[in-house]
Amino acid sequence: MPELPEVQALVDFLAERTAGLAVAKVELASISVLKTFDPPPQALEGSPVDSVTRHGKFLDLDADGTHLVFHLARAGWLRWSERLPATVVRPGKSPIALRVRLSDGSGFDLTEAGTKKSLAAYLVRDPREVPGIARLGPDPLGDGFTLEVFRGLLAGRRTQIKGLLRDQEVIAGVGNAYSDEILHVAKISPFAIAGSLPPEVVERLYAAVRDTLAGAVRAASGRPAAELKDAKRAGMRVHGRAGQACPECGDVVREVSFADTSLQYCATCQTGGKPLADRRMSRLLK
Ligand SMILES: [Zn+2]
């Protein structure tokens, strides 16, 4: 799933490629991907692209005041083409959900792999009409995201820090992968209670949030859309690396699995050497 750094790189990539162009056509191959009905997709046709921006993990293409907003979710992706095929996309087995044609023949497809469809697109006059955007917390790379603001977000929260970092209504743009990375950098257990972290630990976590995301944005920026997924994977310290060696201490990277997700961490670096209970492991031991 693309998170803030990859979405920012996609924004930069699209902004550069669409500069000076207009939207020629929007083709829907999956009706369910479009969550709004007014304005219709035809409203974009002929409209010049004014800007491409990001709200958390949402991309926002503004064409003359009509915004095409989309969220790639778990298995969605953006595929850029310098020259799109002339054939109209049809509903069916193809992973293409939506195609945007630009005035010079280039354009992009929003694709989604797998059966669990969660890719979502919206056509709105104001991005705040998208419920997920209206509820977004502050952007962790924004100027206003100070240590004091971060302290305020954690204060009194009885939730686990891993879940809090992923909560889009608390902080916009961090997901499962970068929350694992941030907690590893900050040397904090994913299950630590957010509101109980001592002040110096909060400070360390704040620095880890900013540095990890800024570093990932730098690593992703300038890369074409097609390379971003692999680049993200390659840059990970512990996320998705269960069984491999921790780059800090050499201990094995461990995993806790849940019904439809998992987290990775290093016990030596993050939990005082004690492995966290893993549901799947304990089930196997019963
Ligand atoms: Zn370690």
Image: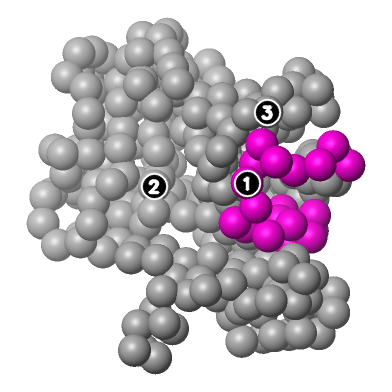
Please state which amino acid type lies under the numbered disc 2.
Ala
19 w.r.t. 75: above or below: above
Q: How far apart are marks 2 and 1 (CA)?
A: 27 Å
Residue 266 disc label? none
Residue 189: within the magenta? Answer: yes
Residue 95 location (% of width, % of height):
25, 58
Secondary element at tag 3: loop
**Dot 2: few (<14), some (14–19), or many (≥20) neighbours within 10 Å?**
some
Residue 171 position within the rendered picture, expressed as x and y whole percent measured from the top left: 60, 32
Three-letter amino acid code of the residue under disc 1: Ile
Range covered by the magenta-colored residues: 181-200
Q: In the rendered image of this protein, does residue 59 appear above or below residue 248? A: above
Identify residue for label 3. 155
Identify the mark nearer the N-term, 2 or 1. 2
- Relative placement, left or right, of 52 versus 114 is right
Q: How far apart are marks 1 and 3 (CA)?
A: 10 Å
Residue 193 is tagged as 1
Which residue matches tag 2?
Answer: 73
Q: Residue at x 36, y 20 (%)?
A: 130
Q: Which of 133 and 284 is in front in this view?
A: 284
Residue 176, position in %: x, y?
53, 55
